[in-house]
Amino acid sequence: MPLGLDKLDFAVLCSLALAVLAYFSKSKIQELLSSDDAIKVNSDSRDVVQVLRENNKNYLVLYGSQTGTAEDYAKKFGKEMAAKFSLNVMCADVENYDLENLNDLPSNVIVSLFISTYGEGDFPDGAIPFEDFLTARESGDLSNVKYTLFGLGNSTYEFFNGAAKRVEKYMNEAGATRVGPFGEADDGAGTTDEDFLTWKDSVMEELKDQLGLDEHEQVFEPSFEYKQISQGVSNEISLGEPTAQYMPNNKIEFSPEGKQVGPFDATHPYVAPITATRELFSSGDRNCIHAEFDLSGSNIKYTTGDHLAIWPSNPDEKIAKFLECFDLDADTVFSLVPRDSTVKLPFPVPTTIGAAVRHYLEITGPVSRQFIASLVQFAPKEDLKVELTELSRDRDFFAKEVTVKYLDLADALLHISHGAKWGSVPWNFLVESVPRLQPRYYSISSSSLTEKQVVHVTAVVENFPNPSLDDHQPVTGVTTNLLRNLQLAQNKEDIQKTTLPVHFSLEGPRGLFKGYKLPVHVRRSTFRLPSNTNTPVIMIGPGTGVAPFRGFVRERVKLLEKQPNTTLGKHLLFYGSRNTSDFLYQEEWPDYSKKLGDSFEMIVAHSRLENKSKVYVQDKLIERKDEIYDLVKNKGAFIYVCGDAKGMAQSVHAAFVKILSEGSEISTDDATAILKAMKPGGRYQEDVW
Ligand SMILES: Cc1cc2nc3c(=O)[nH]c(=O)nc-3n(C[C@H](O)[C@H](O)[C@H](O)COP(=O)(O)OP(=O)(O)OC[C@H]3O[C@@H](n4cnc5c(N)ncnc54)[C@H](O)[C@@H]3O)c2cc1C
Ligand SMILES: NC(=O)c1ccc[n+]([C@@H]2O[C@H](COP(=O)([O-])OP(=O)(O)OC[C@H]3O[C@@H](n4cnc5c(N)ncnc54)[C@H](OP(=O)(O)O)[C@@H]3O)[C@@H](O)[C@H]2O)c1
Ligand SMILES: Cc1cc2nc3c(=O)[nH]c(=O)nc-3n(C[C@H](O)[C@H](O)[C@H](O)COP(=O)(O)O)c2cc1C
Ligand SMILES: *[C@@H]1O[C@H](CO)[C@@H](O)[C@H](O)[C@H]1NC(C)=O
Ligand SMILES: *[C@@H]1O[C@H](CO)[C@@H](O)[C@H](O)[C@H]1NC(C)=O
Ligand SMILES: *[C@@H]1O[C@H](CO)[C@@H](O)[C@H](O)[C@H]1NC(C)=O
Ligand SMILES: *[C@@H]1O[C@H](CO)[C@@H](O)[C@H](O)[C@H]1NC(C)=O
C-alpha cells in the first residue's frame, strides 16, 4: 500500500484522531492518549529516515542505553542543539526504529550516536539489533552517513566502552564519516559529566562549521505541549501508576478474580506482593534488607542467577524539598501532548505534579554541570544568572561547591540562591530535563529450583553521613531506603524509635502497593552454574556479592534432595565481611554445609575484627593457591565473581593471574590471556556493579 497504511494503522489513526478531539472536550477517551500503546503506534513507520522526513526533522540523535545514562545525555545534547541552533532534532532509542535506510539520510542531516556498554563490553539489551544491523553492513553501505559518537562506560570494567568502540569500528568499515572526536565517558573516574562537556564543546564547534549554524542564547524548545487541567482527580488521572494498565478504568488488564494479567516485562512491571522482609545486619550502624517477592500468578519466570529490577518511588523529604525549591503545587493536574510523533511521553498522563515527582522523576543523586548551564535562562535574578554561569563554566568551582558536598538538584539550587525559591523554572522544562526515575537491579539470592515463584533479594542500605554538611544530613539511596522503610513497617517495628533518614509513602497510587507491594521485573542474566554437576565451582562474593551464591548453593542443596545419587564437584565459596555482625545469612550456611557434605566449603575473610589485621577474599584465595590452581588447570573449574567491581573484582582477578602464572610458570600476560579466554565459555563469570 502506498503510504504503508494497513488496516491496523488506519484504525489506530482513527482512534487517535478521536482521542485528540476527545482531549479538547476533556472527555473520558483522554486516557487513550496517555496509554503506552497509543504512543507506540503514534508514528506510522519504523523507518527512521521516513519518520525524520515526515516530521521535518533536520538532526538525528540515537541512543542505546541500559539504565538511562546514555539516554539522558542524548536528550540533553538534542535539547541543546535545538535550544542553541534552532534545529529540529529527533531523538530516539535505537531500539524503536529500523535503520536499514540510514544511508538515505538527507545530506545535511548528521546523526549523533550515544551508546553505553553493559555486561562485559556488550551493547545494552535494547541495542543488540543495532549491533546486528552494523555487523551486517558491507564496505560503502553507510558512505553517505556523517555521525558523531559518544560512548558511556566505566574504566573499572575490562572492556571499557566496548560497545561504542565497536560502533566506531563498524561505522568506519561501512564507510561512514565521523564528525568531531570519538568521546568516551568514564564513570569509573567519576568524570562522565566532564567527559561529555569536553566532547560536546569540540563537537559543537565542528558541527557549527559543517552545517553553517548560528549560535544564540539557549531557548528552551518544549517537545510537549503542556496543559494544565482544571478538573479534579478523576479515574483518568494517573496518580503514579507504573503504566496505564494499572489505571482504574483499565479493567481489560485484570482477570475476573482481579488478578493482574500480563505480559509483564521491562516496560510493564508486575506489582508484586512482598511476602517477607528482614534485617540481616545485627550491629545497627548499617542495614541490609532481605526481601521476598511473590511472582506467582504473574507468569514471570526466573532462573537462578537472574536480576530483579525494583521500581522505586521518592521519599517524602526529598519530594517536599523539590516542590519547595521550584515553588510547585503537588495537586496541579497536567497533561503533555507530544509535539510530533517522534517524541514519546516520559510517563502516563494526565497526572499530578505530586505524582510525577514521587513516582516518575529522578530528583535525587548528583547534579550535572550541564543541567546547571541549562538553568541559566530561567534564573530568577541577574546575580543568580551570573552565579549559575560561573558554576557551569568552571569545573573545579562546580566540584567544590556542588559535587563534593553531595548536593542534589534542589539542594544545589537552594544553596546557590541562599534559600530563595526557583519558581521561574517552568515545570514542563523540569519534566523534560530531570531524568526518569529508573528501576534498580538486584542479584536474585534465591534459587528457582527451591523457590519457583518467589524471588529473594539482598540489598545493603545506602545511607552515610554527608561529611561536608554541618548537620551531617545523610546521603541516601532511594530504593534501599524504601526497602528498609517497608521492612520496618511490615515487621511492625517502632519507626519512632528508629531514626530513619527518609520516609516513604508505602501505599502507592490509589493504594496499589497496599499490603506491601512494589513494581518489579526480572532481567535475564548469563550468570549460570555449569550444567555438569561434577564440574568444580569457585565462587567469590564478599558483602552483598554473596547474593547470587546463596541462590547457587540453595540450587545444589535442592538438586541433592531431589536426586540423592548426584555427584557434585567441589564447590568453594569465598565470602568476606567487615565483622561478624554483618555476616550475611550466617545462620543458614551450616545447614547448607551439612546437606552438601564434603562437596561444599565456605571460606570466610573478615576485614575489621578488633585487634586483627584486614583479611580479604583474595588473601584467602592465595592461601589456597595450590588447590585453586589444580581445580582451574586440571579439573575445569568454573569461576564466579560477584559484588564490588572497583576494588574487589580487580583484586580477585589479579589473584587468579598470580595463581595461574606461578602454577604454570608462565608470564602474568599469558595468565591474563588465559583468564580472558575462559570468559566466552562461561568459565570466568562476573556479576559486578
Ligand atoms: C547487575 C546489578 C546487580 C546488583 N545487585 C545488587 C545486590 O544484589 N544487592 C545490592 O545491595 N545492590 C545491588 N546492586 C546495586 C543496586 O542496583 C543499587 O545501585 C543500589 O542498591 C543503590 O540503589 P538506591 O536506589 O538505594 O540508591 P540511589 O538512589 O541509586 O543512589 C546511589 C548512590 O548515590 C548516593 N547519592 C545520593 N544522593 C547523592 C548526591 N547528591 N551526590 C552523590 N551521591 C549521592 C546514594 O547515597 C547511593 O550511595 C546491583 C547493581 C547491578 C547493576
Ligand atoms: N567503590 C568502592 O570503593 C566500594 C567498596 C566497597 C563496596 N562498594 C559498593 O558498596 C556496595 C555495598 O557493598 P557491601 O556493603 O556489600 O560491601 P561491604 O560490606 O562494604 O564489604 C564487604 C567486604 O569486602 C571488603 N572489601 C572492601 N574492599 C575490598 C577489595 N578491594 N577487595 C576485597 N574485599 C574488599 C570489605 O572490607 P573493608 O573493611 O575494607 O570495607 C568487607 O570486608 C556495593 O554496591 C559495592 O559496589 C564500593
Ligand atoms: C552491570 C554493569 C556492567 C557494565 N559493564 C561495562 C563494561 O563492560 N564496559 C564499560 O565501559 N562500562 C560498563 N559499565 C558501565 C556503564 O556503561 C556506565 O555506567 C554507563 O554510564 C551506563 O549507561 P546507561 O545507563 O545508559 O546504560 C557497566 C555497568 C554495569 C552496571
Ligand atoms: C539416580 O537417581 C535417579 C532419580 O532418583 C534415577 O533415575 C537414576 O537411575 C539414579 N542413578 C543411579 C546411577 O543410581
Ligand atoms: C564486631 O561485632 C561484634 C559482635 O558481633 C561487636 O561486639 C563488635 O563491636 C564489632 N566490632 C566492630 C569494630 O564493629
Ligand atoms: C584489643 O587491644 C586492646 C589494646 O591492646 C585491648 O585493650 C583490648 O582488650 C583488645 N580487644 C580484644 C577483643 O582482644
Ligand atoms: C564505576 O564502577 C565502579 C565499580 O562498580 C563503581 O564503584 C563506581 O561507582 C562506578 N561509577 C559510577 C559512577 O557508577
Image (tube, rainbow, N blue to C red):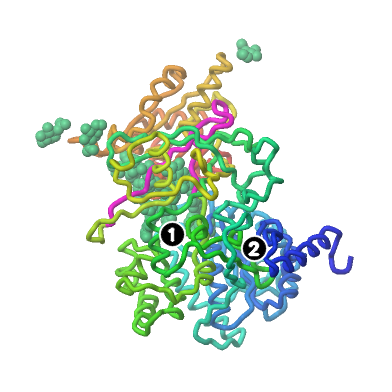
Residue 301 versus residue 373 in the image, above or below = above
Q: Could you tell me which residue is drawn at 53 percent across and 42 percent down?
A: 308
- Is 525 in the magenta? no
Q: In the picture provided, is 403 more to the left or to the right than 440?
A: left
Viewer-nearest residue: 321 or 665? 321
- The relative height of residue 16 versus residue 424 in the rendered view (above or below) is above
Q: Which numbered disc, 2 or 1, marks the residue closer to the eye?
A: 1
Split into quadrants, the picture shows ligand 4 in the one at top right
Q: Which residue is mark 2?
A: 170
Mark 1: secondary structure: loop
383 or 202: which is nearer to us?
383
Q: Nearer the viewer, residue 334 or 436?
A: 334
Q: Amino acid at mark 2?
A: Tyr
**What stretch of residues is rendered in magenta?**
440-466
Quadrant in which residue 458 is drawn: top left
Query: Dot 2, crowdedness within 10 Å: few (<14), some or many (≥20)?
Result: many
Residue at the spot x=63%, y=38% of the render? 300
- Residue plotted at (19% across, 35% down): 610
Would you name the residue on which mark 1 appears?
187
Mark 1: amino acid: Asp
